[in-house]
Amino acid sequence: MVALKINVESLTRAAFAPFGDVIETDGSAHYTINQGHAERFHDLAHIDVQEAGGKPLINIFRAIPWPNPVRIAAMERHPLSSQAFVPLSTIPFLVVVAAPTDTLRPEHLRAFVTNGRQGVNYARGVWHHALLALEQQSDFLIVDRGGSEPNCDEVFFGRDELFLDYPVEQK
């Protein structure tokens, strides 16, 4: 049995760029609308769902916290689309990702923790763990792909023991 500990980094646009978009208002382009009563933070993520006749879906997922340390047993990817997760509260959550590859190995994984106000949009083909809520049950708005073609590949790590340990390692 192989034990590998994955360090958890703070989520930033620069660190997450190889995997997709960080959805947040801080530092985002915006302009005033509605006669000065609202700010529009515009085009925060590249939503990619139209491959093979896909259509956009808006969903709400209710996630139950995972125990700490989190055991990483499986990862998934969506070969036909992006997938966005936007928290509906201010509770941080964990993000575990790996760049698109046909041979996913544990050493490819990176882990991030959000500040509670950030969402993520996984680019097409990016490996990611299932939603990892922290602290308490949390709701998320999901922008996903609907269509008749299969759009989820999974990899299971078998006997390897992979863990990530919260809190964040400060860099």
Image: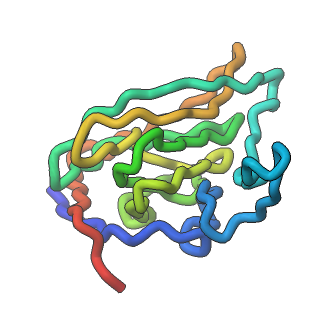
Q: Quadrant of residue 129?
A: top left
Residue at left offset 76%, top offset 51%: 40
Quadrant of the snapshot with the N terminus: bottom left
Whole-percent x, y for residue 123 in the image: 66, 50
Q: Residue drawn at (56%, 51%), measured in percent from left and top?
A: 120
Question: Percent x, y for residue 102?
Answer: 57, 50
The percent coordinates of residue 96 (x first, y second) are 41, 55
Nearer to us in this view, 37 or 52 = 37
| Horizontal side, residue 87 vs residue 72: left or right | right
Q: What residue is rendered at 36% in x and 54% in y?
A: 92
Residue nearest the observer in this picture, 27 or 108:
27
Number of labels in the image equals 0
Q: Is residue 120 left or right of residue 35?
A: left
Q: Quadrant of residue 168?
A: bottom left
Vertical placement of 102 versus 155: above or below?
Answer: below
Residue 43 in view: no
User: What x and y, as percent, mark residue 78?
Assistant: 60, 37
Q: Which quarter of the rendered picture does the C terminus lie within?
A: bottom left
The furthest residue to the top: 148
Q: Nearer the viewer, residue 139 or 100?
A: 139
Residue drawn where x is 53% and y is 34% of the image: 141
- Does residue 109 appear in this view? yes
- When the figure is inspected, residue 154 is found, relative to residue 27, above or below; the finding is above
Extreme residue in the bottom direction:
171
